[in-house]
Amino acid sequence: MLLKKIVFLFSVIFTISIFAQRKKTDTVYIYEKVIVYDTIYLEKAVKLKPANLMFSSHEILTKEINSVQQNIDKEELQEQLKKISNNKLQFGIQAGIGFKKASWAENISEKNLQFGQDLGIWISKSIINPNFSLMLSANTSHWNSTFDLNANKEETYLDGFYFSEDNQPLLFQRFNNKHFEYILELKAIYEWRNFRPFIGVLANKNNYKIQFLVPENNILNKLDDFKSNQINFGFSFGLQYRVLKRFLIDAEYQHYKINNLSLKNSSFDFDIFKTNNTFVERKISLGISFFISK
């Protein structure tokens, strides 16, 4: 019995010693140390001694510039500047005076020339050549009267009754050649130095009027106007001269051929002038133009 206890005790001690010799696994921690290096630049002022530098004198430069300017032709330079400005779209205004002679009024008035004033606007553009340009103008002219036929003041060769196509009576009252004229003109202009000769075509409308006493409710007691309402075509030519940079002086001749001049009223079918008539108007004018555009 005692022997069994001794054997059991040694067995326990042996087993404990075996388990005590087993190694236990340890946890290992690894750390990484990172070192960052940076470069710092420091600026430091450095004193420099000025070197003995050589520069050319201003006198030499001035002489060179003067020598270049002496070789420039001022007239040629101005001509080139004109060509550059002519290539632009230009516009302006015009005013002038003139005289008109109408063949149809020669038998009525002893005064052959009719005085008038003119005002207009124009626009021009160079084409093909800088010296060649086209100008389109619109003008209004007012022409003063050279005669005044008034049946209420004196006897005239137009006095008396007239009858319309439907036999309505018309009694002449008054007629003179004071009127407004509206003109649309296209000019072809060639510029040589300051001279600008031109030729043109134009259309005009003269606002003549004659007064008759017309019937109203079968009674001859209403004063009414009979007016011209036709467009005439003609031609023109003349010469312009440039003064300074923005002014032009121009002299112009205009010629119109008026076919079938008529003075009519929308309410009455009547024309005091005979049909198939042909008249001529000639005008001479002198004016001045101003360039609005630069």
Image (cartoon, rainbow, N blue to C red):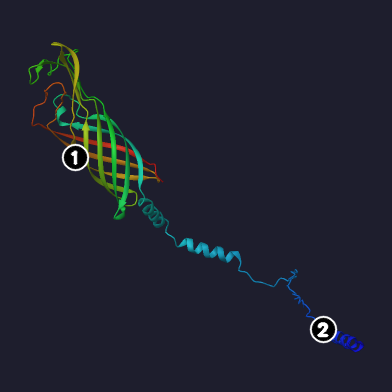
Q: Secondary structure at mark 2?
A: helix
Q: Secondary structure at mark 1?
A: strand
Depth order, front residue of 5/175: 5
C-alpha gap between disc 1 and disc 2: 139 Å
Q: Is residue 13 found left or right of 219 in the rendered image? A: right
Assign the N terminus to one quadrant of the image: bottom right
Provide the residue designation for mark 1: 234
Q: Which of the two discs, 1 and 2, labels the residue nearer the N terminus?
A: 2
Q: Is residue 283 visible?
A: yes
Say which residue appears at 41% left-offset and 56% top-offset: 77
Provide the residue designation for mark 2: 19
State the image coordinates of residue 60 (x, y, percent, origin top left): 57, 66
Depth order, front residue of 32/52: 32
Q: Which mark is residue 116?
A: none
State the image coordinates of residue 103 (x, y, percent, origin top left): 15, 31
How many other residues sit within 10 Å of disc 1, few (<14), some (14-19) or many (≥20)? some
